[in-house]
Image (tube, helix red, strand yellow):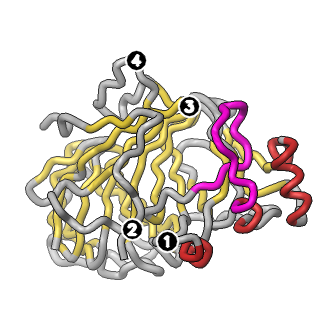
Amino acid sequence: MAHEHAAMLAVRKPWGSTDLAPWSGIAADGAAIGEIWFQRRAAGAPAPALLLKLLFTTQALSIQVHPDDAFAHSIGLANGKTEAWYILSAEPGAEVAIGLKRQLTAPELRSAIADGSIAELVQWHPVRKDEVVFVPAGTIHAIGPGLVIAEIQQSSDATFRLFDYGRQRELHIDNAVAVADAGPAERQVAAKRLTNARALLVASPYFVLERIELPAQSHWELHAEHETWLLVIAGDARVGQMNAFVGEAIYLDAEHAAIRAGRGGLTALVAYRATEPSHSLLHQRDGQELHSPLPHSSRQPDPQTATAGSRPRSTEARP
């Protein structure tokens, strides 16, 4: 059983931002922060199977691909990396790339990586606030500038770069060709309203992602049967004995937690280990279960910061 206010690790990236407001109170001090990782606070706690991040982009990220579990195991890694993005904010014209414009053979993909033409073959899509993008392992993808994204993923740093916009970082041609589905991506699935309070965003073999919207000062019970992350994206709430504000996360595992939404209500992302949405995830405190479908405290202090060249604490899930 676990119920913690998540710790935050700020990671410097060349494509990051010095302005993290309103999503984080971390002071960038002139350094470009690209990612904030949410981590267990309890000393010696088992590594979670899921990793929750915030991404801040002022430049395009590398064009990349992640392996599935089978390939990851074959090269000695604990697991692959399937992920989902929730767009928290997007400047006008902001885009993400998902899949390719056309199908390539393995030799064609290898050649496109080698000569840099892969940059012209990825399929870019405009995105707006509150959109969701699911990125299965094997999908060639990239993230453009002008975005703040909440990312939930399998806990793995297995990334194979295909193109890096002249940043002189290593490309991983052999592994990228081996794992990539070198063609157009599958169509994204629309969000599904589950109840008045819950919307299903992603259901995958590795995690479920939902958005919950709770009215002002309403009382609820969250039933976290398995590893669960709650990220506040609007409003605030009291979760158990902890206050949670925009940009802060709560970690729960095998735990029931009372939630009282603040005066402005609460909108949060909830990601948990499952393949289908949990029917018992959220209840009103008066005992009514919402299954009918539809027709001030300060932020957490002292985050850690990792430089672009340093390696943060390993995110590889332990067996």
Q: Which mark is residue 15?
A: 3
Instruction: Kindly report the distance in space between the C-alpha atoms of the residues bearing marks 1 and 4.
Output: 35 Å
Residue under the image location 35 percent in, 82 percent down = 279
* Mark toward the start of the polypeptide (1 vs 4): 4
Q: Residue furthest top?
A: 30
Looking at the rendered structure, the kind of residue marked 4 is Gly
The numbered disc on residue 79 is: 1
Horizontal and vertical percent position of residue 98: 71, 54
Q: Earlier in the sequence, mark 2 or mark 4?
A: 4
Name the N-terminal-most of marks 4 and 3: 3
Q: Secondary structure at mark 4?
A: loop
Which image quadrant for residue 94? top right
- The magenta stretch is 159-175
Q: Residues within 10 Å of mark 1 (few under 14, many from 20)?
A: many
- Please state which of the two labelled residues, at mark 1 or mark 3, is closer to the viewer: 1
Separation of marks 2 and 4 at Cα, in angstroms: 32 Å
Q: Is residue 232 visible?
A: yes
Distance of label 2 from label 1 (alpha carbons) = 7 Å
Determine which residue is flagged by label 2: 317
Q: Are marks 2 and 1 in contact (CB under 8 Å)?
A: yes
Under tag 1, what secondary structure? Answer: loop
51 or 67: nearer the viewer: 67
Label whose residue precedes the other's in the sequence (2 or 3) = 3
Tell me the kind of residue under disc 3: Trp
* Amino acid type of the residue that numbered disc 1 sits on in the rendered structure: Asn
Q: Image quadrant for the N terminus? A: bottom left
